[in-house]
Image: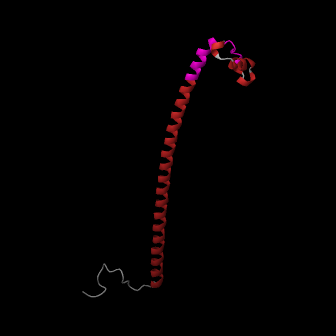
Amino acid sequence: MAQGSDSNDTSYRSPSPGGRQSSSDDMKKVMRREKNRIAAQKSRMRQTQKADSLHLESENLEKENTALRKEVKQLTEEVKYLSSVLSSHEPQCAGLTPAGLLYPPHHHAAYHQHMAVPHHQH
């Protein structure tokens, strides 16, 4: 077979007017495609890193949410317990009136008097 007659051989080009310009344009296309390929690869990598970061943040927020819900549950139980203790104690306590509970304890004289006397001495 004669050299250059193979139709799959892309290294041989027939001479054309401005053949060098065509070669230069081809080179620019190749370079542009390579730059584009690299840019797309970097973009995909950044996108993957961002997704990974968001996934980790989501997991951490879920853990924090679970811990906060547990704390709320414990505090709610404590409020119920303390409310029941207060409710059971109120009938025994002449020094505390509903009006007295409207103010902080340090502003209520009856509170100080009441707290200074042990319960069994009432």
At which x and y percent is residue 40?
A: 47, 64
| Magenta-span inclusion, residue 84 | yes
| Image quadrant containing the C terminus | top right
Could you say which quadrant of the image residue 101 lies in? top right
> Residue lying farthest left?
1
Residue 57 sits inside the magenta stretch = no
Coloring basis for residues? secondary structure
In screen coordinates, is 112 left or right of 32? Answer: right
The residue at the point 45 percent across, 74 percent down is 30
**121 sits to left or right of 45:** right
Residue for point 56% across, 29% down: 75
> Which residue is at 45% across, 77% downward?
26
Write down the region rendered in magenta.
81-100
| Quarter of image, res 88 | top right
Residue 63 drawn at (x, y percent): 49, 42
Q: Residue 13, percent across and down?
A: 38, 83
Identify the residue at image location x=27%, y=88%.
Answer: 2
The x, y position of residue 92, in whole percent, is 63, 12
